[in-house]
Amino acid sequence: MFPWGGERRFNAYSHYCRTLFGGRVQKLPVDAGFSCPNRASRTQGGCTYCANNAFSPSYLAENEEIATQLENGKRFFEKRYPHKNGYFAYFQSYTNTFAPLPVLRDKFEAALQVPDIKGLVISTRPDCLPSEVLDYLSELSQRTHLTVEIGVESFHNETLAHIHRGHTVESTFEAFEKLHSRKVSTGTHLIFGLPDETPSQWLSDVQLLNQLHPQFVKFHQLQIFKNTAMESEYRDHPGRFHPLSADEYVRFLCDYLERMSPEIVIERFSAEVPPRYLAVSQWNLLRHDALVRKIEEELERRNTYQGVAL
């Protein structure tokens, strides 16, 4: 038994759901029709790596009602994961607080009316949380299981500027402070492999993740998508990138986990998209569950676990 009460060597999201809900709770991605503030007004075309359609499930159809999307999602995932303890409505596409409060309220409340929806996961940016939205999220979190997922991506302002994120590390910490002060559960995701960053920097950054103190985290390896600005950069300046092999990534993640707070729940270690979206193939399409097994085997070989070095 490890510090978080589970038997695995990292604080797994599956353990969190089993403890709180008695079993798996499936996320159902929703496209609420929002955009992103940096796609037009703040930068030229948005984040250089962005290919939102690569992560959109096939059942999502443009302009469908929230309830219809969620019911379609239930049918889609029922075949893959028949044994569940309900669902979270996952507002995933683009920036899901980038709209007037009445619009946000209508979308989120509609999702909560769908049977078997146990809560919401709202993906957004650190610079799209005005006070009135924060107050609503605080009120909402008292009525349902709510996680506000912030795209951090990097802890380096130079990188954030280079990839056209349109926010800073300082605004990231400010957003988390505001959410935590309102007792709103937080999640985040980080990308390992962005241009001009190195594995040694990422290992140093774990202390910043610990200071940020999200409840949940997702780790993604950088993927180079077709028809993006980053594809052009990778082709023209490959020396700016530090891609890791699957085995190198596993060893790096284990080093990272040993330094990471045991209180942070891990949702994912890598990203997966259909191969047709990738400009650069990676790891011979190693699936996430196979990667997780490799991570657990390496942690067992080391006889270490998440947070052991703290």
Image (tube, rainbow, N blue to C red):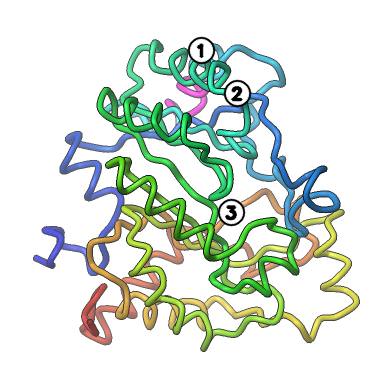
Q: Which residue is mark 2?
A: 100
Q: Magenta span covers which residues?
A: 72-78
**Is residue 221 in the magenta section?**
no
Q: CA distance from mark 3 to mark 1?
A: 26 Å
Q: Nearer the viewer, residue 199 or 274?
A: 199
Residue depicted at 25% across the width and 42% down the height: 17
Residue 63 position, x and y percent, is: 70, 16
Q: CA distance from mark 1 to mark 2?
A: 20 Å
Image height of 148 relative to 32, above or below? below
Whether residue 157 sits left or right of residue 268 in the image: it is right
Q: Which residue is mark 3?
A: 272
Q: Would you say the residues marked 1 and 2 are in contact, meaning their CB atoms lie under 8 Å apart?
A: no
Residue depicted at 77% across the width and 59% down the height: 48
Q: What amino acid is labelled 2 in the image?
A: Pro
Mark 3 or mark 1: whose residue is earlier in sequence: 1
Q: What amino acid is labelled 3 in the image?
A: Glu
